[in-house]
Amino acid sequence: MIAIPLKTNKENSALAPLFGKAKWFAFVENGNITIEKNEAQGGSGVVNWLLGKDVKTLIMQKMSQPPYQMIKEEGSITILYVGSDRIELPEALKRYEANELVILDDTNAPDIVKSHDRQHQQR
């Protein structure tokens, strides 16, 4: 199952840029898309929710260090980085199908996570 954070509860929604603050998540399984309200609190809560739903792939834009670390240590979810530009769900899925997304790992996560953490500090 694939999870993708969204801004709204529509299939053509833009991805929510901040993983832990996404109001909605799209879940894609066998080509079927369902959208659920995110009731979890913060990035770590969202990670636990996704683990409970047996998510295997997460497509996202920005994530802070604690949820990244949780996912990495747990080991069952692959994180795919879709980029930082505004993108809608259909385009993100098209890029996923074409293998155009970047796997987030320790070689590139520091830059992506660091960029997100800097934004937090500026608020």
Image: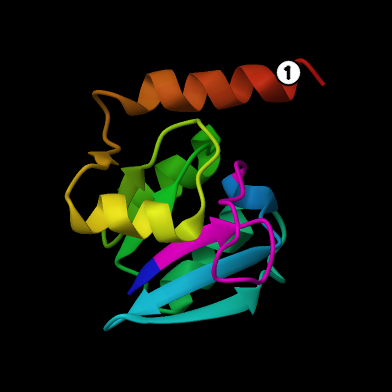
Q: How many numbered markers are drawn?
A: 1
Q: Is residue 38 above or below residue 107?
A: below
**Magenta residue check for 17:** yes
Residue 13 versus residue 110: which sits nearer the camera? 13
x and y percentages locating residue 46 in the rendered image: 58, 61
Residue neighbourhood size for the residue with mark 1, other residues' Cα within 10 Å, grouped as few (<14), some (14–19), many (≥20): few
Residue occupying image coordinates x 44% and y 42%: 68
Residue 108 at x, y percent in the picture: 29, 24
Locate residue 75: give its quadrant. Answer: bottom left
User: Helix, strand, or loop for circle 1?
Assistant: helix
Question: Looking at the image, which residue sits at the far right?
Answer: 123
**Which contiguous range is marked in magenta?**
3-18
Q: Is residue 79 one of those drawn in magenta?
A: no
- Name the image quarter holding the N terminus: bottom left
User: Does residue 25 appear in the picture of this structure?
Assistant: yes
The prevailing secondary structure element of the residues shown in magenta is loop
- The chosen color scheme is rainbow
Residue type for callout 1? Gln
- Residue at 52 percent across and 66 percent down: it is 48
Identity of the residue drawn at 34% across and 59% down: 93
Instruction: Specify the farthest residue to the left.
Output: 99
Image position of 71 with respect to 90: above or below: above
Q: Which residue is mark 1?
A: 121
Seen at 17% across and 49% down, the residue is 99
Residue 40 as seen in the image, left or right of residue 2: right
Residue 78 can be seen, yes or no: no
User: Residue 17: horizontal and vertical position, in percent?
Assistant: 60, 41
- Residue 22 is situated, as x and y percent measured from the top left of the image, at 66, 55
